[in-house]
Image (spheres, rainbow, N blue to C red):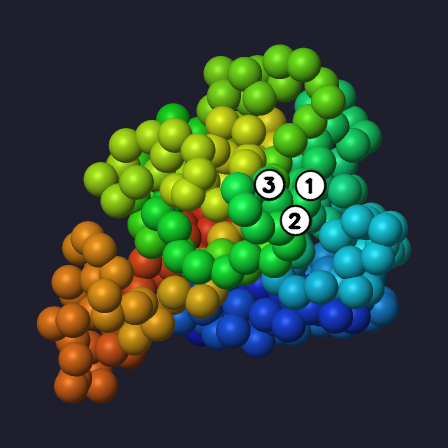
Amino acid sequence: MSALSKPRAAVIQFPGVNCEYESARALRAAGAEADVLRWNVDSTLLTEYDLFLLPGGFSYQDRIRAGAVAAKERILDAVAEAIELGKPVLGICNGAQVLVEAGFVPGLAGGLELAIAPNRMPDREGYFSDWRFLKSNPESPSWAAALNGSVLPVPFAHGEGRFTSRNEGLFEQLDAAGQIVMRYAKADGSAADGWPVNPNGSVMDVAGICNRAGNVLAMMPHPERCAWLGQVPEMLEGDWGARRQAAMGSWDDLQGPGPGHALFTAMVAAASRRKES
């Protein structure tokens, strides 16, 4: 991909987020030009960008609810305009919480339809960090459908990661529409069946949800933290753990793509198709 044809990515840095630079690096490795933009920049600058990423962290110290304060910032109006134009948007962890609090996901009737609530875990509470496998949905309208149903190990780190809603039947509706893009699963892709494979009590083992049009994805695990093979734990079960063990001692192999790289590649490819159409 030539420099002139590369899509431009905006990584929006709210006060308290801490994953903006590795997110930008992952986007660059996937073929985009990526800039980190502070939340208070002139929002008209965002019209120059082809895709948007809201990174993980703890915006505004997670006051009120995680993502609730950042969701009220004026820059989200510019993100809303980008969404209406069909530009790809990804929210990771705290970024996912912001997208939900802003009403962009699932984006059915408008307003706050979902919550990403505190974890529910047996015999413990609060923040939890580990690795889990994600099963992608090839029937989703999301650009992430390009993952073709693959099962990828991805780390997570959150205290409020449980997708839930008071709207009865909402998750069944989202499932029927393909808007459940990722679920926690076992290494072989079979159903999580709750704890401990589902690490937070999320309804229907949901790890990521998109809007109706499929251009906005909110996901709790951190693909930017596994964009390179060297970030994968050596003892992780499955194919990716075996690849990591085989790469021991080879710097070049360790700098190869990790499981998270595929997600960023799919997002950049979607932005490129839109840019060229």
Q: Which mark is residue 160?
A: 2
Q: Which residue appears at 17% of the width and 65% of the height?
A: 243
* Quadrant location of the N terminus in the rendered image: bottom left
Residues at marks 1 and 2 touching, judged by CB atoms closer than 8 Å: yes
Mark closer to the chain start, 1 or 2: 1
Residue 43 drawn at (x, y percent): 82, 61
Q: Nearer the viewer, residue 18 or 265?
A: 18
> What amino acid is labelled 1 in the image?
Ala
Q: Does residue 275 sit above or below 164 in this rendering?
A: below
Q: Is residue 217 left or right of residue 244?
A: right
Q: Does residue 171 sit above or below 75 in this rendering?
A: above
Q: Which residue appears at 64% of the width and 31% of the height?
A: 164
Q: Which mark is residue 120?
A: 3
Quarter assignment of residue 186: top left
Residue 265 drawn at (x, y percent): 39, 56
SS label for mark 2: loop
Give the spatial CA distance, label 1 vs label 2.
5 Å
Give the spatial CA distance, label 1 vs label 3.
9 Å
Q: Is residue 252 left or right of residue 262?
A: left
Q: Which residue appears at 44% of the width and 59% of the height?
A: 130
Residue 66 drawn at (x, y percent): 75, 52
> What amino acid is labelled 2 in the image?
Glu
> What amino acid is labelled 3 in the image?
Arg
SS label for mark 1: strand
**Residue labelled with disc 1:** 117
Give the spatial CA distance, label 2 vs label 3.
9 Å
Q: Is residue 14 left or right of residue 123?
A: right
| Residue depth check, mark 1 versus mark 3: number of the one nearer the observer | 3
Mark 1 surroundings: few (<14), some (14-19) or many (≥20) residues within 10 A: some
Q: Answer yes or no: is residue 102 visible.
A: yes
